[in-house]
Amino acid sequence: MNKSILKEKIISIFSSLSEQSIDSILTHATYLNCAKGDKLISEGKQHHYFYLLLEGSVKSYYQKESKEICVWFAFDNEIISTIKTFVGESSNETIEFLEDSNLIRFKIEPIKELAQKDISIGHWINTILTEHAIFLETKLHGLQFMTSSERYNALINIAPEILQKVSLTDIASYLGVSRETLSRIRAKQ
Amino acid sequence: MNKSILKEKIISIFSSLSEQSIDSILTHATYLNCAKGDKLISEGKQHHYFYLLLEGSVKSYYQKESKEICVWFAFDNEIISTIKTFVGESSNETIEFLEDSNLIRFKIEPIKELAQKDISIGHWINTILTEHAIFLETKLHGLQFMTSSERYNALINIAPEILQKVSLTDIASYLGVSRETLSRIRAKQ
DNA sequence: GATTTCACTTGACAAATGTCACAAAGCTAT
DNA sequence: ATAGCTTTGTGACATTTGTCAAGTGAAATC
């Protein structure tokens, strides 16, 4: 994919940014292809990039003994990062591809420096952080407020495509129930 | 409390900001006293301010039928807001004082406008958002990863003062267990 | 086409937690 | 001090969910 097609796509996704700001961001961007099963960010490690997932899907999970507990999933045109690596600490999540994917990699530090000069980039990062916080609050609310079957129904209402892309095992851990319990929830409907 | 003492205090808390930035923020600030039981922000309503809690304590909770489910607590020198009201939507949390408290109220919109001009204020808001997101992730991780007694022990290790200021009923809902279960967890130790 | 592998389902049982009811202890105001 | 209210603790029981084990079905591999 050449730079100009990339730029088209980025302009449409980062609609809040001026073309000039996008140009300065693209200076620190690289196009990438990754295969199903590849790990993008690993638990316990620092990581100096964040990503825009152009096409494909990933899951983010914690490791608990031999089990994985999914925290979130991302699909086409979503920003991928972890807060911890974004502030320079080591990640507590692993991010893994659910299918062959292509994405754009951005180096965090230079973009943060840009944000110190270009206020629209600062504002853009702000928006991403805010949206992430709202996502986390909504998820927390669901875990404390709703029964597991309510959470399941809410999920497939909001993001039905998840059933096509994500295994029921991963969805169960995302919902905070065992694989078997999710199976029974689905059987009752 | 007069303006100069206030300013001293704010300088020590907002250490990342220059004195000039603090001055411009203080233009939109008011000193406030509130009594135990008062509600600062109500579920379902918009709210145009955020706060710095100077002395005192608050709880933030969702209402579920007749029960309250606590989301977070705040004590001396902490910033108080809800993400939803910060982006102009109506709150899904209620914030209520656990004791007589004094605080500083900041009008959100003018401060956001300041952040568009003063990059250090933008960066400061950014830091608050990031810390909040890390708090939420940690809480989520605890809910999906730890048993209730592990969560209880983690809480009183990190914030032992919470036992003095917050009722066990509220702590139980914060931990995601019933009042009775928390009582039994405590009895076993 | 047979075999292996993987994802999912189902059953049986145990463990954790919620719910309801009531008792005990601590506060508040008179 | 006492009455009344709120908070916390405890017992009995029901419900939910997890765990272990076995079974099914579909896709992948040979």
Image (spheres, coloured by chain):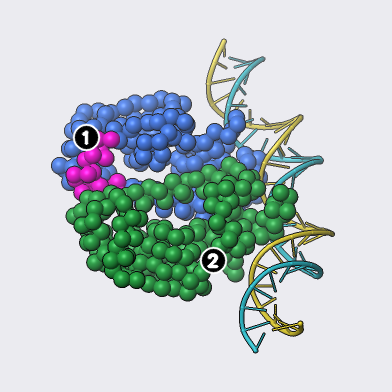
Chain colours: A blue, B green, C cyan, D yellow
Chief SS of the magenta region: helix
Q: Is residue A99 left or right of residue A103?
A: right
Name the chain under label 1.
A
Image location (x, y in percent) of residue C29: 62, 84
Identity of the amino acid at label 1?
Answer: Leu
Q: Do circles 1 and 2 both sit on a common chain?
A: no
The x, y position of residue B45, in whole percent, is 41, 70
Graded by Cα atoms within 10 Å as few (under 14), some (14 to 19) or many (20 or more), the crowding at tag 1 reads some
Question: Viewer-proximal residue, B81 or A38?
Answer: B81
C-alpha gap between disc 1 and disc 2: 45 Å
Q: Nearer the viewer, residue A71 or A188?
A: A71
Residue A74 belongs to magenta span: no
The residue that appears at 34% across and 49% down in the rendered structure is B127
**Residues shaded magenta:** A109-127
Label 1 element class: helix
The residue that appears at 45% across and 69% down in the rendered structure is B101
The part of the image, by quadrant, that contains residue A9 is: top left
**Cβ–Cβ below 8 Å for labels 1 and 2?**
no
Residue ranking furthest to the left = A20
Which residue is painted at 39% across and 34% down in the image?
A56
Residue A160: x %, y % from top left: 47, 46
Q: Which residue is mark 1?
A: A26
A177 to the left or right of C22:
left
Question: Residue under circle 2?
Answer: B63
